[in-house]
Image (tube, helix red, strand yellow):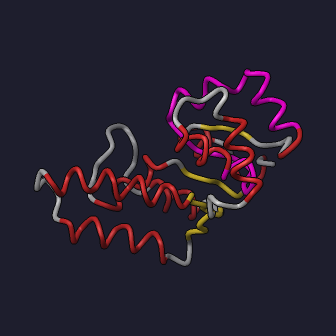
Amino acid sequence: MKLLLDTTYFLPAIGIAVKNLPRDAPIQLIRKGHQIFISKITLFELSAKGAKYAASESIPPERITRGIRALAYAETMNIVEIYESAILHTAFKLRKILNDFIDCLILSSAINQCAAMITEDNDIHDIKEDKIYQEIILTKNPHFKILKLKEILEIPLAFKS
């Protein structure tokens, strides 16, 4: 299945541990046969977060740079450009129901390119019942799902749409 992963799952690649999430979540998903997608804005988010840690000297800048480059050039990662018209138009619609435009771009990337978005972000999960969101999904990608990592790791691959 084509899965777009939220930024959180890539933080370990730049040296930032995330409580209650496996460091190797993308690798686990690849091993289960999924195709992993990453929004180009996620690379920016990782850079911004990494800059904060580098400025406080918590993580060496080289570690952050190495992780971002590894993601950007990995053959197992599919990078979604955020400036395609369909992605921007969907993001503009999502902005009516999500306050963070970066989240809108990431979700829009997933809706337009993938079968599901994997995120722990409650704001994103909370819009699933919203009328605007449901209209977007109906017209763009009727089988699209927003899932948490534990949900996708528990579902056998043979039963996924």
Q: Quadrant of residue 39?
A: bottom right
Q: Position of residue 92 (x, y in %)?
A: 68, 40
Which contiguous range is marked in magenta? 109-138
Q: Quadrant of residue 70?
A: bottom left
**Magenta stretch mostly in which secondary structure?**
helix
Viewer-side residue, 125 vs 107: 107
Q: Is residue 90 magenta?
A: no
The residue lying furthest to the left in this view is 57
Q: Looking at the image, which residue is at 20% across and 52% down? A: 53
Q: Looking at the image, which residue is at 71% across and 53% down? A: 87
Q: Position of residue 125 (x, y in %)?
A: 60, 29
Q: Position of residue 115 (x, y in %)?
A: 74, 50
Q: Looking at the image, which residue is at 61% across and 68% down? A: 78
Q: Is residue 61 left or right of residue 157?
A: left
Q: Is residue 90 left or right of residue 138?
A: left
Which image quarter holds the N terminus?
Answer: bottom right
Q: Position of residue 120 (x, y in %)?
A: 50, 35
Q: Looking at the image, which residue is at 63% across and 44% down? A: 107
The residue lying furthest to the right in this view is 139
Q: Is residue 153 left or right of residue 155?
A: left
